[in-house]
Amino acid sequence: MLRSILINKKKIPVPVPFKVLDELINWLQSYVIKPNETITRIKFDGRDIDFGIDDRICVPSLDLKESSSIDIRVDSPDRVCLQALEALANLCSILERVLKPIAVTCWQGGNRDIPNDLNTLLEDLDLINQLIDHLFLWLDHSIDREALELLNKKIQQEISLLNIAISRSDWRGVARLLLKGVEHTVIQMKRDIGVAQEAIFAITSTPGYQEQALR
């Protein structure tokens, strides 16, 4: 039978003869993982396993052997959210600094290929979308996410409009979109990120949360 697994790179003994992966994961969630923690990654024999993120994690019933390698990452959802929000805040700060210079380049550029800096900016906007989607997987339901959802949709719309303008080589149109749309969205998003961070800090500082963390 499987005798041990890795949780956060620490070797943990497995005292029960599990035959399939989902039985092992159910046992971990019931008896090993703390109430304020959750599984954020599962590697089975070197490959990542997809699983649903809900009250109970769902994994396939893969056969376990004594030689099976199970590497699991466990984290606090609130810590995952704070990391995502910090990354979002950093991206927004970068975009704030580069938006105007890129807009000026586009305005003065005339008909030519897409500027490299503009390509990078589009990639950063797409990364913001991905980070927000990741954030919403873990964000506590008691925290209002409406403002970030609306801004995320706005960024998606602005990416589409930018791509249309780029396809037409409408560089002055790109500049207008950057200065009249994207810049305002990024500034507002930075404010809303701060609000979300404060809400998470308020939750994690409550006595009930701290008691769970010590169990």
Image (spheres, grey):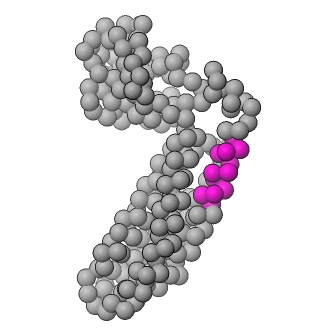
Residue 88 drawn at (x, y percent): 51, 57
Range of magenta residues: 192-203
Q: Is residue 173 above or below residue 70?
A: below
Q: Residue at x 46, y 53 (%)?
A: 131
Work out whether residue 132 can be spotted.
no
Tell me, yes or no, whether the highlighted magenta stretch contains residue 162: no
Tell me, yes or no, whether the highlighted magenta stretch contains residue 199: yes
Work out whether residue 4 can be spotted.
yes
Quadrant location of residue 11? top left
Q: Residue at x 63, y 63 (%)?
A: 191
Residue 120 drawn at (x, y percent): 35, 69
Residue 71 drawn at (x, y percent): 35, 26
Q: Which residue ends up furthest to the right in the rendered image?
A: 207
Quadrant location of residue 66? top left
Position of the N terminus, as image quadrant, is top left
Quadrant location of residue 8? top left
Q: Is residue 83 above or below residue 58?
A: below
Q: Is residue 49 above or below residue 86?
A: above
Please identify the dominant SS of the magenta region.
helix
Q: Residue at x 55, y 30 (%)?
A: 37
Residue 79 drawn at (x, y percent): 55, 41
